[in-house]
């Protein structure tokens, strides 16, 4: 079984699905073909976006408290909850079809970890921060394509 683009789908499988086996993201929307529910059309389904936002919220809840930019554990927990709750709120907006509201919520959220001093970021420089930032930007892009 060869998998030329290394995306987890065999070349034969990708040909069967109408996907280019040499491209890991044929529609160039940021989602690799193996997870993209619409691999041939930029964007994704609203159900997929909602799921991803809920998964992101869970991921944030699993972050170590040390990655939050706070003086004490209780403030770190507040920041963790604030970020996770916004992601859940955006997921709910997507579920209701309110894409503009979801986008607003996520754009506001990106300001909390954009590596600028003011307002202070909620998360310290870390792999978690980078992944979270990249994923939120990806979700904003997918919502724009709705
Ligand atoms: Ca492949
Ligand atoms: Ca894609
Ligand atoms: Ca797509």
Image (cartoon, rainbow, N blue to C red):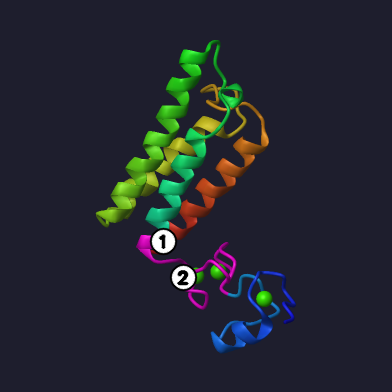
Sequence order check, earlier mark of 2 and 1: 2
**Residue linked to disc 1:** 48
- Badge 1 residue CB within 8 Å of ligand 3: no
**Residue linked to disc 2:** 37
Neighbour tally class for label 2: few under 14, some 14-19, many 20 plus, Cα within 10 Å: some
Residue 132, given in percent of the width and then of the height, sits at 56, 42
Residue 128, given in percent of the width and then of the height, sits at 61, 37
* Whether residue 11 is situated above or below residue 81 in the rendered picture: below
Answer with the quarter of the image where residue 83 lies: top left
For the point 72% across and 73% down, the residue is 5
Residue 44, given in percent of the width and then of the height, sits at 44, 66
Give the secondary structure at mark 1: helix
Discs 2, 1 touching: Cβ within 8 Å: yes
Q: Which quadrant holds the C terminus?
A: bottom left
* Distance in Å between CA atoms under marks 2 and 1: 7 Å
Give the secondary structure at mark 2: loop
For the stretch drawn in magenta, the main secondary structure is loop
For the point 52% across and 35% down, the residue is 62
Residue 85, given in percent of the width and then of the height, sits at 37, 35
Q: Residue furthest front?
A: 1
- Badge 2 residue CB within 8 Å of ligand 3: yes
Q: Which quadrant holds the N terminus?
A: bottom right
Image: magenta residue range: 27-48
Position of residue 69 in the picture relative to residue 47 (left or right): right
Q: Is residue 47 magenta?
A: yes
For the point 54% across and 65% down, the residue is 29
């Amino acid at each position: 079984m060869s998998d030329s683009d290394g995306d987890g789908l065999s070349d034969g499988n990708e040909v069967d699905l109408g996907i280019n086996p040499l491209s890991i993201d044929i529609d160039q929307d940021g989602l690799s073909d193996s997870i993209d529910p619409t691999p041939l059309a930029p964007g994704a389904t609203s159900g997929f976006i909602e799921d991803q936002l809920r998964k992101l919220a869970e991921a944030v809840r699993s972050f170590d408290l040390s990655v939050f930019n706070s003086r004490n554990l209780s403030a770190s927990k507040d920041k963790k909850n604030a970020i996770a709750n916004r992601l859940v709120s955006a997921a709910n907006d997507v579920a209701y079809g309110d894409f503009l509201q979801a986008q607003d919520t996520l754009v506001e959220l990106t300001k909390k970890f954009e590596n600028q001093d003011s307002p202070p970021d909620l998360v310290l420089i870390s792999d978690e921060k980078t992944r979270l930032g990249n994923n939120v930007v990806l979700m904003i892009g997918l919502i724009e394509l709705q």
